[in-house]
Image (spheres, helix red, strand yellow):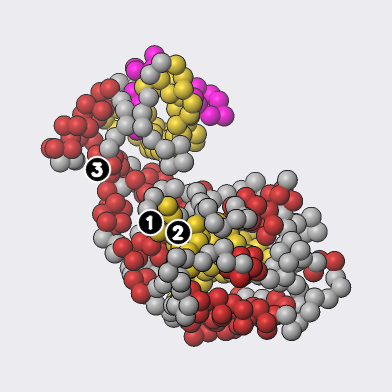
Amino acid sequence: MLLDEAEHGGSFYRSKPYISEPVPRFDHSRRAPLAVFASFEDGFITHIADGRKGLSAGTGLVRLNLEDLQPLKRHVSFDEVLDGIGARVARHLKQRLTTGGLLPPKSLGAFVDRITELDTTVSPRLARYSERRAQALRRLEPIARENLAYQKESLGLALEIAGISRDDLLAWTPTDDQQRSFLDGLPGAQVREDAMLLADFSTLPGFKVTGGTTHYGSKVFVSEQDPSKRLTVIMANRLPLEQQTGADLVYFNEAYRSFILVQYKAMEKRHDEMEFRWQAQDQFCDEVERMESLLAELRRLPSGQQPDGFRFSDNPFFLKFCPRVVFNPDDKGLFKGIYLPLDLWKRADAAGCFAGKRGGKVLTFKNVGRRINNSEFVALVAGSWVGTSIEQSTVLGEIVRKVLETGKTVTIAIKHASGPADDGREIAD
């Protein structure tokens, strides 16, 4: 978005923790990122900032909130910007430079590419708005986009459980090399070799079993507010992105030695209703059977008597049914959906809640009955009130191996212990 100081009576630039200014109403999601280019000198772009659409500021006006206002290395003239942009886009951009306002995607991409050519210091901050990035996204095949969507969701959920901001998700950009996981496109992520990874995580249960995996991406996330909060995330897979079949999340709480596994399922629209269908002996039934087999192995290892091992439920398996699986790297939100503990799903299925008219099974928002939402699930897992006991977590390796055999990417998230008070209460309260 372009903002001209003259349009706002010179009041836009102020010394405050954040800046808020009424501007003409514009159409933009409050959840989506917004880059603002400000002009505090006639004919020049002087600053960039992160913007967020606020509440109404009067008739035809909305409040624009800005944070992290950054001066350019040098003031860039409007003419200099326009000279490096194609004629068709330049005509539209010239009008916006004069009056301010929201730039459409193609104009924004071209403008960002030109600004970063003239001032390379802002390239990392503006990378997600560039036309080069937009072109790379358009080249992704539909199945690749779907797999990236699942992987982004599993990573976002892990960060939410750990109490760490999901803002880092917005820094994603397609890689120049072959993309194998969402993690590959985040700054600071590393592609790791088996030996390196196993040396780093040899003290955690389950990682030796991933030795046959052909690709790892790993990254450590740290809370800006509390540096003692750390989450190590590993995305492991054995297939190219276009051949993967979704993602599962394995979340391990190091302090309580507890893990849970979330398996994602996409719902489809039918007769104005979102639903998930399955029938006997299909892939979904095979996956449930696999979970039940693993659960039987877990329950051969009964929980001990340590207070830290107490759980409301020691069944670590959860299903998340999602009505929309769309890859939007510019939205850090989680998928809306239905969480069902495996035991609850089995009980509802046995009671005939999902019986279809022709012998199949169908799950909808209407017939599912009791369910868990995002915030409820995060609160339960953050404090390890659900998940494996300390003793049961020793078989984590078998869980990871089974997920990898399905062709999915397994997102392994390890919330590191940071002290006795690290029990997730700040999330649950």
Can residue 2 be spotted in the picture?
no
Which residue is painted at 71% across and 64% down in the image?
386
Pointers 2 and 1 in contact (C-beta within 8 Å): yes
SS at mark 3 in the image: helix
Near-viewer residue (39 or 359): 359
Near-viewer residue (355 or 335): 355
Q: Position of residue 214 (x, y in %)?
A: 44, 80
Q: Is residue 131 magenta?
A: no
Give the magenta part as a residue range.
1-21
| Label 2 – label 3 distance at C-alpha | 36 Å
Specify the label residue 304 is tagged with: none
Q: Position of residue 169 (x, y in %)?
A: 48, 53
Please state if 230 lies on the left or on the right of 418 as rendered: left
Q: Which residue was labeled with disc 1?
A: 270
Which residue is painted at 46% across and 19% down in the image?
57
Can residue 24 be spotted in the picture?
yes
Which residue is painted at 57% across and 84% down in the image?
209
- In the displayed image of the protein, which residue is found farthest to the top? 9
Q: Is residue 342 above or below residue 163?
A: below
Near-viewer residue (361 or 424): 361
Q: Which residue was labeled with disc 2?
A: 275
